């Protein structure tokens, strides 16, 4: 197994890692390894997940309808119902 030495770590970051390691009953080295593995696993999931923009683009062009736009508009208008409440205005 390879060894890794980290130099120049900020004191505050070291304290946070040390406290976290103590709470998790791990050594500092074990905690660093755990955090690195956890980060890389999450990063891989994020990279393979579709972004909202990609999901929307995948949907574009998926609507198929043989009606013309005018026929669709006519059907929408025909399905609308007026209510008594709005008949006389707000």
Image (tube, rainbow, N blue to C red):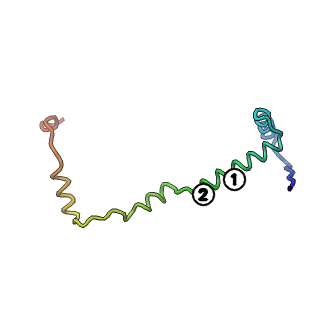
Question: Nearer the N terminus, badge 2 or badge 1?
Answer: 1
- Asked whether disc 2 touches disc 1, contact meaning CB atoms under 8 Å apart, the reply is no
Residue at the location (21% across, 59% down)?
72
Disc 2 designates what residue?
Answer: 47
Residue at the location (13% across, 38% down)?
87
What secondary structure is found at the residue carrying circle 1? helix
What secondary structure is found at the residue carrying circle 2? helix
73 in relation to 23, above or below:
below
Q: How many numbered callouts? A: 2
Q: In which quarter of the image is residue 18?
A: top right
In the image, 56: left or right of 22? left
7 in relation to 56, above or below:
above
Q: Quadrant of residue 49?
A: bottom right
Q: How far apart are marks 2 and 1 (CA)?
A: 10 Å
In the image, 88: left or right of 50? left
Number of other residues with Cα within 10 Å of mark 1, as a class: few under 14, some 14 to 19, many 20 or more: few
Residue 45's x, y, as percent? 61, 54
Residue 6's x, y, as percent? 85, 50
Tell me, for residue 40, which label it has, or none.
1
Between 11 and 26, which is closer to the camera in this rendering?
26
Tell me, for residue 79, which label it has, or none.
none
Q: Going by the picture, which residue comes out furthest to the front?
A: 1
Residue 11's x, y, as percent? 82, 39
The quarter of the image holding the C terminus is: top left
Residue at the location (87% across, 51% down)?
5
Residue 4's x, y, as percent? 85, 53
5 in relation to 58, above or below:
above
The quarter of the image holding the N terminus is: bottom right
Number of other residues with Cα within 10 Å of mark 2, as a class: few under 14, some 14 to 19, many 20 or more: few
Between 90 and 33, which is closer to the camera in this rendering?
33
Q: Going by the picture, which residue comes out furthest to the top?
A: 23
């Amino acid at each position: 197994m390879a060894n890794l030495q980290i130099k120049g770590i900020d004191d505050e970051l070291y304290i946070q890692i040390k406290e976290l390691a103590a709470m998790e009953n791990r050594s500092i080295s074990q905690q660093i390894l755990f955090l690195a593995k956890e980060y890389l696993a999450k990063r891989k999931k994020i990279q393979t997940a579709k972004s909202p923009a990609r999901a929307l683009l995948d949907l574009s062009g998926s609507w198929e309808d043989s009606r013309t736009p005018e026929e669709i508009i006519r059907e929408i208008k025909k399905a609308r119902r007026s209510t008594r409440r709005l008949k006389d205005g707000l």
